[in-house]
Image (cartoon, rainbow, N blue to C red):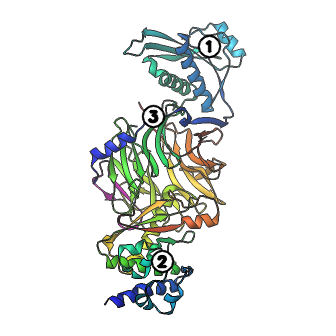
């Protein structure tokens, strides 16, 4: 608010890098897979080899990495109109689903424009010998990966009944020597770009519900200040810079307000404000620390961490204010509440014998399950389909990210060469 | 007037460090003269190399902040695990800075609280804030003005020590006092 928004925008513009070098890419390693993976056969797409291979290989990688599928060779089969015999053959190979597709050029590349393509695919239920539908997309040669992710999303949804999240993005902070970068990458770790680079720490990135902005805390002013950063333009503005510390931004589901933690009145307390920084309202008054607010998906509640009862525990309060209700009771350290998109489950971090684990609570039954076996887990973040939780951890002293399915079975590790990666936030699924 | 100020200049650090449980800097060469009679510094010219500045520094001048022999040179207050009260051993340090702020009403101070790195970053930010706030309240009690001091937190983001040991964690649980121009 006090900052000149133009200057702030310029500063970010100077620091923002475009695509990052290859060594800065996220690498993803699967460390655990589902028990009952769906066997699926993805044929090589027909058409111009370079294009069709790129498409089918990205679809295969997406499905396999998700942990919900097992790839089955399709042999020489590649037709989008398989015969009963073809499908019978696939069945004997063990496939339950078959995907075939093609990419055809609709306009060649010129010196000023990229080539255009039409990509089509169909998905088949092998045992039932039935088509499960298909799609066609018109796209440029620069959109091969995003087109493949949309195909993967379609397949995933038809076969599991849940929306896929292959087309989504994740934000995280990479710390290398003396440098912090707020990066955004596709959910498969590719196309990482830096939205902000700073010599001072950056924490708590939070996606706006429409996926166009990130709120975060930056320490570039030698104290924590909350910014809202528009990703397309690279411009940002100060959302909260009051005397004391400003932190823990969380968007309301309608994207109009932010819940934040301010210390302007002494202790760390919850406030809400408009995204432009106006309309500051105190949400609650407690005798201790209140922090890490998070709106429930229906916008009715704000879950948060508080030590008002002695140890840090999770509470919730009506988003319009009122009395806080305690949510966690087991153990003496339960922090960072994050609700699942359907509002039924809550991921959080609990401490057991000095080890910090991602934990999942069924809010209806209040039953909790520890999902991870790493020791320094932080910052859980739900995938927009609620099936997977992305979180930060540490392996051999290095900051890494992990994902774990809500049943605790499917696990991945995401790391960056020679740097710490932390503070992940899974972006929304865009319509 | 001048001699009086000079006496105070020399005596104050000793008075304050006498109360501190941290060892005062006693090993400087040729310090014996000063210990016997502070006023002697004025009448006898400083012997050989030792800091010409030390004794002559006005305890409330900005130079005092940069003088390794002044208590004001120290800026860190350490806290026990899960504790947010300023320990007695740091009271003299805080008193000295409070008096310094009172005598330099235009000066401002940023107090940065810090936490060790175990657990949630945002919760640790709040713990660091409790520490900086404790230092701020102690300063206000001892003479600093509210509009001179701002307490903020760096949470676990600026560790001075990065090993996973109790010693290291203890070094990170601290408040740092920075004056205008130092942050």
| Label 2, label 3: how far apart the Cα atoms are | 60 Å
Name the residue carrying label 2: B69
Residue bearing mark 3: A429
Q: Is residue B38 left or right of residue A42?
A: left
Report the residue marked by disc 1: A129
| Residue at screen point 66% across, 35% down | A34
- Residue A165 covered by magenta stretch: no
Quadrant of the image occupied by residue A243: bottom left
Which part of the image, by quadrant, shows the C terminus of chain A?
A: top left
Q: Chain of mark 2?
A: B
Report crowding for label 2: few under 14, some 14 to 19, many 20 or more residues within 10 A (C-alpha).
Answer: some
Looking at this view, is A105 or A118 the one in front? A105
Q: Is residue A346 visible?
A: no
Looking at the image, is A61 positioned above or below residue A30?
above
Q: Earlier in the sequence, mark 3 or mark 1?
A: 1
Give the extent of the magenta segment: A264-282
- Give me the C-alpha separation between circle 3 and circle 1: 31 Å
Tell me where residue A103 appears, x and y as whole percent: 50, 12
x, y percentage for residue A119? Answer: 48, 14
Specify the subunit that label 3 lies on: A
Circle 3: element type: loop
Residue A277 lies within the magenta run: yes
For the residues beneath circles 2 and 1, the answer to whether they share a chain is no
The furthest residue to the right? A92
Instruction: For residue A177, say whether it is visible.
Output: yes
Report the Cα–Cα distance between label 2 and label 1.
87 Å
On what subunit does the disc labeled 1 rest?
Answer: A
Question: Dot 3, crowdedness within 10 Å: few (<14), some or many (≥20)?
Answer: some
Name the one closer to the observer, B160 or A35.
B160
């Amino acid at each position: 608010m006090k900052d000149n928004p133009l200057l702030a925008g310029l500063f970010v513009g100077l620091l923002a890098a475009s695509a990052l070098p290859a060594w800065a890419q996220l690498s993803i390693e699967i460390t655990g897979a589902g028990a009952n993976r769906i066997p699926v056969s993805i044929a090589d797409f027909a058409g111009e080899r370079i294009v069709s291979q790129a498409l089918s290989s990205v679809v295969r990688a997406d499905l396999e990495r998700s942990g919900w599928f097992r790839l089955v060779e399709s042999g020489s089969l590649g037709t989008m109109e398989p015969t009963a015999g073809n499908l019978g053959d696939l069945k004997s190979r063990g496939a339950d689903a078959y995907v075939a597709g093609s990419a055809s050029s609709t306009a060649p590349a010129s010196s000023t424009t990229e080539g255009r393509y039409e990509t089509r695919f169909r998905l088949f239920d092998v045992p039932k010998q039935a088509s499960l539908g298909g799609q066609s997309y018109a796209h440029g040669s620069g959109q091969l990966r995003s087109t493949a992710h949309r195909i993967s999303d379609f397949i995933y949804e038809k076969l599991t009944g849940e929306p896929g999240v292959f087309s989504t993005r994740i934000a995280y902070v990479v710390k290398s020597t003396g440098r912090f970068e707020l990066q955004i990458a596709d959910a498969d770790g590719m196309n990482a770009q830096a939205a902000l680079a700073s010599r001072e720490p950056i924490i708590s990135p939070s996606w706006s519900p429409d996926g166009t902005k990130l709120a975060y805390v930056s320490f570039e002013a030698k104290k924590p200040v909350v910014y809202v950063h528009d990703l397309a333009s690279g411009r940002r503005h100060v959302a909260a810079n009051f005397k004391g510390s400003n932190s823990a931004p969380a968007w309301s589901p309608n994207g109009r307000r932010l819940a934040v933690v301010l210390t302007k009145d002494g202790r760390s307390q919850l406030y809400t404000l408009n995204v432009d920084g106006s309309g500051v309202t105190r949400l609650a008054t407690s005798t201790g620390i209140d922090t890490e607010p998070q709106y429930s998906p229906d916008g009715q509640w704000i879950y948060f961490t508080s030590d008002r009862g002695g140890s840090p525990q999770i509470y919730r309060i009506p988003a319009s204010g009122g009395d806080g209700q305690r949510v966690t009771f087991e153990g003496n350290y339960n922090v960072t509440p994050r609700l699942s998109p359907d509002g039924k489950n809550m991921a959080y971090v609990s401490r057991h014998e000095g080890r910090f684990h991602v934990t999942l609570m069924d809010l209806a039954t209040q039953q909790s399950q520890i999902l991870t076996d790493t020791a320094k887990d932080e910052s859980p973040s739900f995938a927009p389909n609620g099936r997977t939780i992305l979180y930060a951890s540490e392996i051999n002293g290095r900051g890494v990210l992990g994902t774990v399915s809500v049943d605790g079975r499917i696990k991945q590790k995401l790391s960056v060469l020679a740097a710490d990666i932390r503070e992940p936030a899974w972006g929304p699924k865009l319509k | 007037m001048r001699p009086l100020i000079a006496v105070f200049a020399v005596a104050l650090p000793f008075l304050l460090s006498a109360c501190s449980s941290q060892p005062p800097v006693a090993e400087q060469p040729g310090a014996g003269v000063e210990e016997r009679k502070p006023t002697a510094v004025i009448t006898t010219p400083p012997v050989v190399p030792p800091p010409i500045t030390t004794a002559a520094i006005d305890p409330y001048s900005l130079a005092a902040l940069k003088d390794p022999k002044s208590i004001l040179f120290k800026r860190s207050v350490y806290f026990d695990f899960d504790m947010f009260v300023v320990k007695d051993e740091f009271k003299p340090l805080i008193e000295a800075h409070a008096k310094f702020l009172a005598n330099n009403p235009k000066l401002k101070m940023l107090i940065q609280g810090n936490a060790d790195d175990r657990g949630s970053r945002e919760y640790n930010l709040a713990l660091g804030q409790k520490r900086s706030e404790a230092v701020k309240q102690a300063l206000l009690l001892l003479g600093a003005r509210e509009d001179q001091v701002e307490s903020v937190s760096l949470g676990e983001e600026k560790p001075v020590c990065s090993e996973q040991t109790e010693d290291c964690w203890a070094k990170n649980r601290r408040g740092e006092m920075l004056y205008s121009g130092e942050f």
